[in-house]
Image (tube, rainbow, N blue to C red):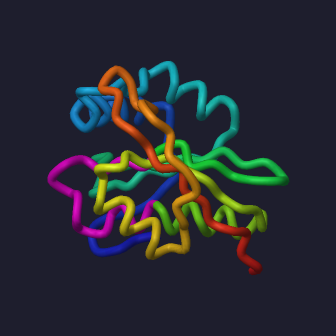
Amino acid sequence: MTTGTVTLAPLRHADVPKCHEIELALFPGDDPWSENAFHSELDNGNYYVGAYDGDELIGYAGLAASPHEASVHTIAVIGHWQGRGVGKMLLRDLLTRVDEIGVPVFLEVRTDNEPAIAMYKAHGFEQLGLRRRYYQPSGADAYTMGRPAQSV
């Protein structure tokens, strides 16, 4: 998938150092994913996609799915690309995958991340619950959100 100069493609093991760099920049007050966590997600066959400006990785997203449900594990876009539709592209790609399976999808999002919450609501997610002190070590709360299975 391509929009302007941004292209989506499967995330590769070679992208993992950049993913970790983005994690460190975006989530300094919490526990950013390690390189090993990304490698493990890819090795376990979970669905991960990268957003690229030319050859530069500018964002990524991933989910795990079973025959019964899917869970968005992460969506991240490097700071200077935020607000330019990259997160929406990544989310829509994940949702296309989920809709092919035909299962509900769930995620957690920081309660203070208003742009992400608005994006999820615009794509059919509803707030299901609150997970207190979900993000560590900051202790930030998270909303659990879900989107029902969609018929294809």
Residue 65 falls within the magenta-colored stretch = no
The residue closer to the viewer here, 78 or 107, is 107
Q: Quadrant of residue 26?
A: top left
Residue at 15% x, 53% y is 80
Q: Quadrant of residue 44?
A: top right
Residue at 28% x, 56% y is 54
**In the rendered structure, which segment of residues is drawn in magenta?**
75-90
The quarter of the rendered structure image containing the C terminus is bottom right
Residue 85 falls within the magenta-colored stretch = yes
Using residue 76 as the reference point, say whether residue 144 is left or right of it. right
- The location of residue 122, given as percent across then percent down, is 44, 76
The residue closer to the viewer here, 2 or 92, is 92
Residue at 22% x, 33% y is 25
**Relative height, residue 55 to residue 19 (above, below):** below
The residue closer to the viewer here, 36 or 109, is 109
**Relative height, residue 128 to residue 79 (above, below):** below
- The location of residue 123, given as percent across then percent down, is 50, 73
Residue at 40% x, 31% y is 135
Q: Quadrant of residue 15?
A: top left
User: Residue furthest toward the right?
Assistant: 67
The residue closer to the viewer here, 139 or 71, is 139
